[in-house]
Amino acid sequence: MTIAHNIETIRRDLPASVKLMAVSKQVSVVQMRAAYAAGIRDFGESRIQEAQTKQQELSDLSDICWHLIGHLQGNKVRKAVQIFDWIHSVDSLKLLQQIDRVAGELAKNPQICLQVKILPDPDKYGWTIPELLADLPQINCCEFIKIRGLMAIPPLGLTIEQTQELFESARDLSHQIAQQSGLQLPMTELSMGMSGDYRSAIAAGATIIRLGSIIFGARAYI
Ligand SMILES: *Cc1c(COP(=O)(O)O)cnc(C)c1O
């Protein structure tokens, strides 16, 4: 199947409220151009260096919105803020505050999702729910970043029902945060849903789905 065909098939039953991000890690710029030609404008990358190389090679496509979806190390924050429009994988208060400070220095306003671990998961980064709730007042003090919502990734090995419940918990948490009095944290985006579970994510209220292999084919690694 071609990339254009895959995108068209996914789009066919996608609600208008859901943004389709093409996850292009390990994908060539030739394949990315095919996705662009099929209408994709949002691309997700998990590594800074790879994204930077691709941005140079795709510099003629000036309306691409670049999303960072992989763990960000403190020493790469400056580069990340320079080259990404969105950072979905902000997973600690310390990192968030560092991004905010650098954003101020660079006069940038990156769009941010807070990565939350709804269930315990030793393989993933992110705030647990109690940690996130405790950090909200300080998160609310950031000046330059634009907090847009939450990002959630289910642990491996859940059933469809458990995955659905996890996505619903993420949605409920985002509502709970948005309603906290005294905070000005808009929680309009829910970044959740990958190739294997995006329908459950949409059913639970996802607004951004991050699809890789279902568009581009299997990758060598996660
Ligand atoms: C790789 C990756 C995806 C895409 O995964 P697929 O299963 O190929 O759709 C989505 N989100 C994150 C955070 C990823 O690392």
Image (cartoon, helix red, strand yellow):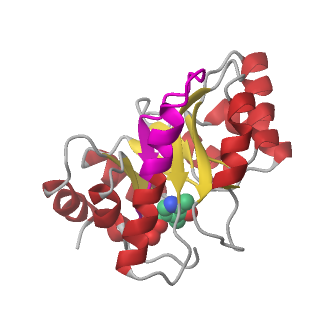
Residue appearing at x 72%, y 74% in the figure:
122
Residue appearing at x 53%, y 37% in the figure:
177
Horizontal side, residue 136 vs residue 169: left or right: right
Q: How many callouts does the rendering have?
A: 0
Residue appearing at x 60%, y 37% in the figure:
84
Q: Position of residue 8 (x, y in %)?
A: 18, 57
Work out which residue is located at the far front of the displayed protein and give it.
Answer: 181
Relative depth, front residue between 53 and 126: 126
Q: Decide if residue 74 is in sight here.
A: yes
Which range is magenta?
171-195
Q: Decide if residue 49 is in sight here.
A: no
Q: Is residue 175 above or below residue 5?
A: above
Relative depth, front residue between 32 and 141: 141
Q: Is residue 117 above or below residue 53?
A: below
Horizontal side, residue 93 vs residue 109: left or right: right
Relative depth, front residue between 205 and 180: 180
- Magenta segment includes 15: no
Work out which residue is located at the far left of the displayed protein and give it.
Answer: 12
Locate the C terminus by quadrant: bottom right
Q: Position of residue 220 (x, y in %)?
A: 55, 79
Q: Position of residue 137 (x, y in %)?
A: 71, 29
Q: Position of residue 167 (x, y in %)?
A: 42, 60
Q: Is residue 189 above or below residue 50?
A: above
Residue appearing at x 57%, y 62% in the figure:
118
Locate the N terminus by quadrant: bottom left
- Magenta segment includes 186: yes
